[in-house]
Amino acid sequence: MITLLVTAALSLSALPAAPGAILLAPDRVFDGEVVHEGWVVLVRGERIAAVGPASRVAAGGARVVTLAGMTLLPGLIDAHSHVFLHPYDETSWDDQVLREPLSLRTARATVHAQRTLMAGFTTLRDLGTEGALDADVGLKQAIEQGIVPGPRLLVSTRAIVATGSYGPKGFRPDMAVPQGADEVSGADEMIRTTRRQIRRGADWVKLYADYRWGPAGAARPTFSIEEMRAAVDTAHASGRLVAAHATTAEGMRRAVLAGVDTIEHGDDGTPEVFRLMARRKVALCPTVAAGDAVEQYRGWKKGAQPEPARIAAKRRSLRAALAARVVLCNGSDVGVFAHGDNARELELLVDYGVSPVDVLRAATSVNARVLRLPELGAVRAGLLADLVAVQGNPLRDMKALRAVRLVMKGGVVVREPAAGAARARP
């Protein structure tokens, strides 16, 4: 464990090992739902032992670490990431899929994982390796075994796409070009491929309910309801859940009727389809940061030029989703932009009209419920001690999430405050 620098050269590494306890004393605690001023959090081993006002938490024998001016939150969760991608303004998606060796992509992914963890995101749902086969399963195992640092991973191996709809594209039709996902046609192939994904280690199954395969590259639905239902029934029978990439209203409608658990993007969602999602309790990961990044890659000078039509349309669709009371996830599509910059999504959600408290809930307690992670997403006795301390108060300024001072994963401090940022006292 990296040494925590505190006054008088006292370090957390000098604290008693489990079952010894650490008492974290920030200015305030966001417990996953609301903020509590003056609360403390007692950690024993890998779990939170007690939470509440300092006067009510019995912390005999615990080492107290004062986090002055800081807010303590549950470890943040990003429900839409691509650890094996890096920003498209560095290397195009096609070149990453076709030209970068798997070994290079895996080495880069380990760095992405570490940067993400240091940014306070202790859990990721990774929705597709985009041509990197099933390497996400190995990366997850390496993190779990302590070989490399990183967040807890929920992986989906390769996404499932309709034959002929995905990419890379633009090559001779008789040329077998490696694809960024698994291609299927028909319900029988969908069942076989879903089972194969599960056998390879997928925690979630990802489908592409639509894609840019229409005339002039327009986004159009790909799978029928019956094809997607075959995947959903197979995954659910195994205890796994299903995410659907869907940007068109019809693709979203089909995916929801097929029984998927989350919709990714939802760019052109209508009030009607969002109301359907709300009735069926299907959550939305809006990924506003990805669209924002792509438009800037295409030349949009943000702040100096009017918003592109795509951004304006996204604002309208997100307002419609909020009006319909759709469950809102925090899912950024990081990989399109730089790993470790995951907080970009949370800042933009506030800019798009989501209240700061709902943004923080989306990144903690809501994501934990949507992803079926009952031991995460809240600061509550008995849960795993995934905690992050940031300087300032993100409810007043979401940019505080960039001022990460302390990261704890399963009771282990993986990022520590600089000298003087925290004080330890007997």
Image: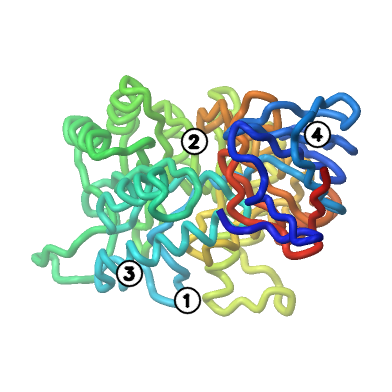
Q: Secondary structure at mark 1?
A: loop
* Mark 3 to mark 4 CA distance (whole Å): 42 Å
* Mark 4 to mark 2 CA distance (whole Å): 25 Å
The residue beneath circle 4 is: 34
Q: Is residue 352 visible?
A: yes
Assess disc 2: are there few (<14), some (14-19) or many (≥20) residues with their C-alpha within 10 Å of its C-alpha: many
Say which label, 1 or 3, has the lower sequence index.
1
* Mark 2 to mark 3 CA distance (whole Å): 27 Å
Q: Which percent across, then down, holds residue 202?
A: 32, 38
Residue located at (74% from left, 75% from top): 303
The residue beneath circle 2 is: 262
The residue beneath circle 3 is: 96
* Mark 1 to mark 3 CA distance (whole Å): 12 Å
Residue located at (48% from left, 49% from top): 247
Q: Which percent across, then down, holds residue 5?
A: 71, 61
- Depth check: give the residue in front, 17 or 297: 17
Q: Secondary structure at mark 3?
A: helix
The residue beneath circle 1 is: 89
